[in-house]
Image (cartoon, helix red, strand yellow):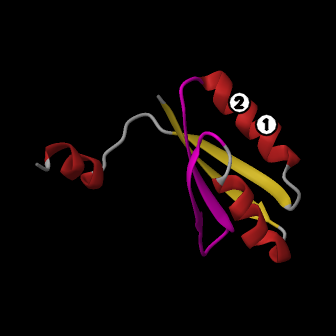
């Protein structure tokens, strides 16, 4: 499983519209509206790097309103939420 975090700059009047389009795409599990230098953060979980490449350079580039993306590849996950879910009975 390949997990990445995609930071997006979006046209101001398109933030909600872009977020709704992103969350409907295969491979994107979550989209957050955030403060700071970026407008949206998308969490991507796909099987291969090729799928990630297709999603980021292909599909995201086709979304009207996306001005810029910055993609970070996750090496290892440390998640209390995931650990709690694994061991809950």
Residue 85 location (% of width, % of height)? 23, 49
35 within the magenta span: yes
**Helix, strand or loop status at disc 1:** helix
Residue that label 1 marks: 57
Tell me if residue 46 is in the magenta stretch. Answer: yes
Asked whether 70 or 82 is in front, the reply is 82
Query: How many numbered marks are there?
Result: 2
Give residue 77's mark: none
Place of residue 59 in the rendered image (x, y in percent of width and height, measured from the top left) = 79, 41
Return the x and y of residue 53 as percentages of the image width and height. Answer: 71, 30
Q: Residue 49 at what x, y percent from top left?
A: 61, 24
**Magenta residues?**
26-48
Please give left or right for residue 88 compared with residue 36 in the image.
left
Quadrant of residue 9 in the image?
bottom right
For numbered disc 2, what is the local secondary structure?
Answer: helix
Hey, which quadrant is residue 38 in on the image? Answer: bottom right
Q: Residues within 10 Å of mark 2 (few under 14, many from 20)?
A: few
Q: Residue at x 85, y 58 (%)?
A: 67
Q: Is residue 12 above or below residue 45?
A: below
Q: Residue at x 64, y 40 (%)?
A: 26
Q: Is residue 19 above or below residue 74?
A: below
The crowding category of the residue bearing disc 1, from other C-alpha atoms within 10 Å (few below 14, some 14 to 19, many at least 20), is few
Q: CA distance from mark 2 to mark 1?
A: 6 Å
In depth, the one of 26 and 78 nearer the eye is 26
Please give the residue where the numbered disc 2 appears in the rendered image: 53
Q: Are marks 2 and 1 in contact (CB under 8 Å)?
A: yes
| Residue 30 picture quarter | bottom right
Residue pictured at 59% horizontal, 71% vertical: 34
Residue at 67% over, 22% down: 50
């Amino acid at each position: 499983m390949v997990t990445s975090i995609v930071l997006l700059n979006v046209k101001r009047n398109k933030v909600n519209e872009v977020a709704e389009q992103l969350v409907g795409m295969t491979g994107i599990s979550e989209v957050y509206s955030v403060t700071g230098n970026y407008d949206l953060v998308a969490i991507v979980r796909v099987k291969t790097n090729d799928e990630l490449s297709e999603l980021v350079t292909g599909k995201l580039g086709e979304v009207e309103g996306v001005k810029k993306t910055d993609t970070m590849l996750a090496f290892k996950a440390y998640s209390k939420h995931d650990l709690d879910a694994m061991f809950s009975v």
